[in-house]
Image: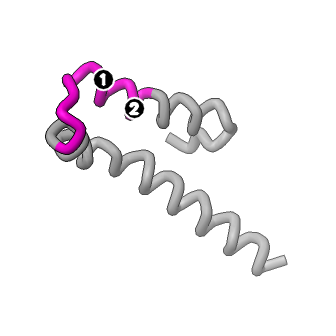
Amino acid sequence: MVAVFMSSYLVMVINTGFAYSVGSLFVIIIRRFNTTRAEAATIQSTLIGVWLCSGTNIL
């Protein structure tokens, strides 16, 4: 039972960290793919939207 709790907690921590760290990749995405700010923001918005709709909303 403790292993299930710890593994679920670890998965949620990793997912939360990844969702919040996409903002730091924003400038890198713009430069690497030669996109506009609006196109790069679409990636971040989609990621956060899917993350929240999946039930992992611990904001």
Residue at image point 28% right, 42% down: 23
Instruction: Categorize mark 1 by other alpha carbons within 10 Å: few (<14), some (14-19), many (20+).
Output: few
- The image shows residue 42 at horizontal and vertical percentages of 38, 24
Residue at image point 30% right, 23% down: 39
Residue at image point 29% right, 30% down: 40
Q: Secondary structure at mark 1?
A: helix
Outermost front residue: 33
Report whether 41 appears left or right of 47.
left
By secondary structure, the bulk of the magenta-drawn segment is best described as helix
- Give the residue number, with chain letter if any, for mark 2: 43
Asked if residue 34 is among those painted magenta in the image, a careful observer would answer yes
Instruction: Categorize mark 2 by other alpha carbons within 10 Å: few (<14), some (14-19), many (20+).
Output: some
CA gap, disc 1 and disc 2: 7 Å
Outermost top residue: 38
Considering only vertical position in the picture, is 29 above or below 15? Answer: above
- Give the residue number, with chain letter if any, for mark 1: 39
Name the residue nearer the viewer: 27 or 5: 27
Name the residue nearer the viewer: 8 or 32: 32
Q: Quadrant of the N terminus?
A: bottom right
The amino acid pointed to by label 2 is Ile
Considering only vertical position in the picture, is 52 above or below 7? Answer: above
Q: Secondary structure at mark 2?
A: helix
Q: What number is the disc on residue 21?
A: none
Q: Which residues are magenta?
A: 32-45
